[in-house]
Amino acid sequence: MPDHMTLIDMLLSRLFHDLISPVSATVNGAELISDLGGSGTELEEEALALIGTSARQASERLSFFRVAFGGAGSNNDHSLADGAKLAAPYLKARKIDFSLDCPVEPKLVRPAPGGVKVILGLICFLCECLPRGGSIALNSVGEQGQNFVLSADGDGANVPPDVRSALEPNVTASELTSKSVVAHVAAVNAGRFGFRFAVGEEPGRVTVNLNFI
């Protein structure tokens, strides 16, 4: 019988697949109306812009979550560049800057199976550590794509107690919240795919060292 995380992968993959098509169609429809132009009022134009922006953000978030928490991220089909392409707009919508530092062309760096999933999950965890926004940087250490450092910098950056406890393997479901569950899933996925990570904390900064075992 498949383990519970595999079943969750399958369920979420189906959910994201079903949702992303109509959302993408909304984006395309809004862009088509915009391209056609017309004599719409200023209010209509503002409404159209809002529809387009909201639909695009929804599409970007679905694409991000599909890899971060769905079955789509459970292989090594995604390069580091693919992961960065998913992370940047997701973080921008949360008013968090993103940067990638890689010694080689990121398109050529393909982490071990599940690696991009784990990285995106840890980015979700770091978002919870930036109460007033800031920046998240992903640094690929070496050329093999197996060792990474993620850092979150911002005013008041810290690991909230409930989020830190969610990283522990023995945490119970009753101790998790909607805020901390993504940190727990990221930690479980790290172990599941053969990665080890360590969280560091200093004033205004939270770091994660991630290594493939």
Image (cartoon, rainbow, N blue to C red):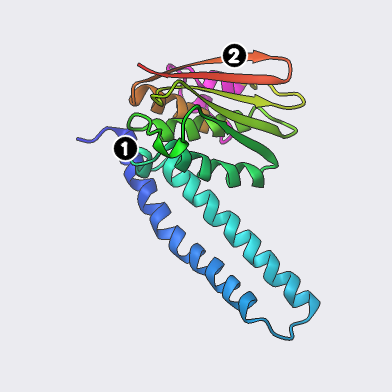
Visible in this render: residue 181? no
**Picture coordinates of residue 156 (x, y %)?**
75, 24
Q: Examine the rendered structure and indicate whether residue 87 appears above or below residue 32.
A: above
Q: Give the structural element (helix, strand or loop) at label 2.
A: strand
Q: Is residue 13 left or right of residue 26?
A: left
Q: Quadrant of residue 101?
A: top right
Query: At x 46% / y 36%, what residue is drawn?
Result: 106
Query: At x 69% / y 30%, what residue is drawn?
Result: 130
Q: Which residues are magenta?
A: 162-179
Q: Examine the rendered structure and indicate whether residue 116 appears above or below residue 162.
A: below
The amino acid beneath tag 2 is Gly
Kindly report the distance in space between the C-alpha atoms of the residues bearing marks 1 and 2: 28 Å
The residue pinned by badge 1 equals: 75
Q: Is residue 112 left or right of residue 50?
A: left
Q: Give the structural element (helix, strand or loop) at label 1.
A: loop
173 drawn magenta: yes
CB-based contact (under 8 Å), mark 1 and mark 2: no
**Picture coordinates of residue 45 (x, y %)?**
73, 74
Q: Examine the rendered structure and indicate whether residue 75 appears above or below residue 213.
A: below
Quadrant for the N terminus in the image: top left
The amino acid beneath tag 1 is Asn
The residue pinned by badge 2 equals: 200
